[in-house]
Image (spheres, grey):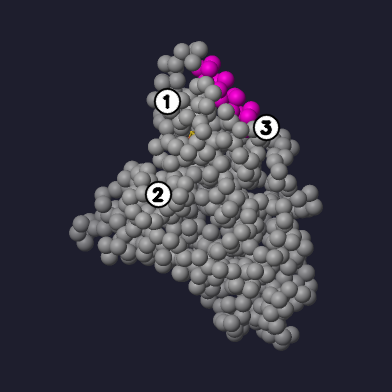
Amino acid sequence: MAAFFEQIATQEPSAAEARSRRWIYIPYDRLHDAVGPLADADPQHTVLVFMESLAKGTRRPYHKKKLTLVLSAMRHFALEQAQRGCRIVYGASPTSFSHGLLELQNKWQWQDLTTNRPAERELRTELQSAQAEGLRITFAPDTAWLSTSADFTTAFPNAATKPLRQRYLMDTFYRHMRQKTGLLMERAHSTSAPKPVGGKYSLDAENRKPWRNEIAVPIRPTFAPDDLTREVIAMILERHPDTFGSLDNFDLAVTRADAETAWRFALERLLPWFGPWEDAMSTQHPDLFHSLTSPLLNLTLLRPQQLVEDVAAAHAEGLIPLASAEGFIRQVLGWREFMRHLHEATDGFRTLDPLPQDCHPEQSEGPAFRMDQNDHDSETWVGASPNHLNANLSLPPVYWGKPSGMNCMDTVVSGVIANGWSHHITRLMVLSNLATLCGFSPRELTDWFWFAYIDAYDWVVEPNVLGMATFSDGGLTATKPYISGAAYINKMSDFCGRCSLNPKQSLGPGSCPFTALYWSFLERHEALLAPLNRMSMPLATLRKKLSAEREALRKRAQLAIDQLGRGDIVT
Ligand code: SF4
């Protein structure tokens, strides 16, 4: 038996304790004792149940660092809670969470198991189904969020009754949350209405500087694996040798104490510089001044409330400029909360899905993407496939690290393979931009992000990719597709200077394919894009192009799509 399981087995309740104590199930992503039912539980009168599920771990080819992060953090949290006085029942199911919990229920005969209402739809539906099979489980409100579903319906009054007729704009929700929380709000007089500090809710327009090595980028703290994490690493390498990503140099925070250290560093050393360069992409400093808190937030090793309050306080003390503070708070208070409500309001985008399940595009046969055929609960986790732009090509080998000759793609993907992370602009304007322009399946792209990124869970990855990044929801989330040619990448990164392709050339051998892909995308979808106000200028420019140029652009774009599809170098 592994050392962790020997250790945790000593923390099980006695028969008398099992009868008299309250039982609480801790989902893998709620590792904090100030949220959910654990917040008001007396440790001396509580039994905590944890469950690892092999079915979940093999359902997608999750990045090895993601599997290690989740399992190591959960095991550390179980031991910490044992030290507080909780009794611990820690299970490892060869199949699903719910089957494992039903087996434990048979053994321990609890009367009721309370849990946080799961954040992931996938776990939520699984546990709700298990109730019908006899699992005695009760869902308590998930207090790890900054907003409630009432906030969402206040911002979008039709969301509850007419979800498909409602356009969801993050800015509407964000303004509501700023007013509700009072974060970065001020009053001119005690009787006047609160207004955003600085006069504007969003200072996004001030945060678009490319990186030119203006200042030294601080070196982040790293967290060497302890014995417990090393045991998880060995298990992942043995059980999941072929899954995505590298486990070399694992140095992520897996305890709340380490997460706090990482956060204090981000707050004091990174966030003062975050705003101006939040959209910049750099080869030497891929993370620049990003806080990298999303993996910790999404496991609740850190709480969003603490983060936004710390940043607002640091701004009030003059330690973080307004543009940086607002940029960070918008991500956490606005975008992150908005994403999870949108996911729930559309049932994980299933209410938008125009295709019956058996008509979904084939899953990729890329080198590492195989759904586990033995996962018998597949109906609960097959994702929705809205596909407004009818994009059905399989995700090509470059997303698995096959060199493409496109330096932006090769650089970002190699970073994802190494670390399971890259910041939002590389996700949006490199990885998703290429997929949207080429017509790669948005569902496949969503699943790729889900398993490849250490911060990805269904409630965040599905709305981000299906909604914002690929426009496959037809504009429910965004007012236009987020696409660009080479000019944007060339301006905001140093990738093009190191690329064998020429960002200033759109036709001919050696030209950057992004620009030709951009124009041929506009041409292909002209009728669908024409009603969108924000697309009127690029469409007007397209219409001025002569048919010979259009045809040349079309051919250049198709050559790149074909080369990417074959896994060849783009020339
Ligand atoms: Fe990417 Fe084109 Fe720039 Fe190369 S030239 S890095 S392919 S945008």
Where does the image place residue 327, in percent across and percent down from the top left? 37, 52
Name the residue at 50% across, 26% down. 511
User: How far apart are labels 1 and 3 at the CA level?
Assistant: 30 Å
Residue placed under numbered mark 2 in the picture: 278
Q: Residues within 10 Å of mark 1 (few under 14, many from 20)?
A: few
Crowdedness near tag 3: few (<14), some (14–19) or many (≥20) residues, C-alpha within 10 Å: few
Mark sitting on residue 254: none
Q: Is residue 486 visible?
A: yes
Task: Please state which amino acid type lies under the numbered disc 3.
Answer: Arg
- Please tell me which residue is depicted at 67% across the width and 67% down the height of the picture: 232
Q: CA distance from mark 2 to mark 1?
A: 25 Å
Quick check: is 561 in the magenta stretch? yes
Please state the extent of the stretch shown in magenta in the rendering: 550-564
Tell whether label 3 touches label 1 (CB within 8 Å): no
Tell which of 284 and 227 is nearer to you.
Answer: 284
Please state the horizontal and vertical placement of residue 374, each as a whole percent of the image: 80, 52
How far apart in space, not on screen, are marks 3 and 2 (Cα)? 34 Å
Compared to residue 542, the image places residue 139 above or below, namely below
Labelled disc at residue 566:
3
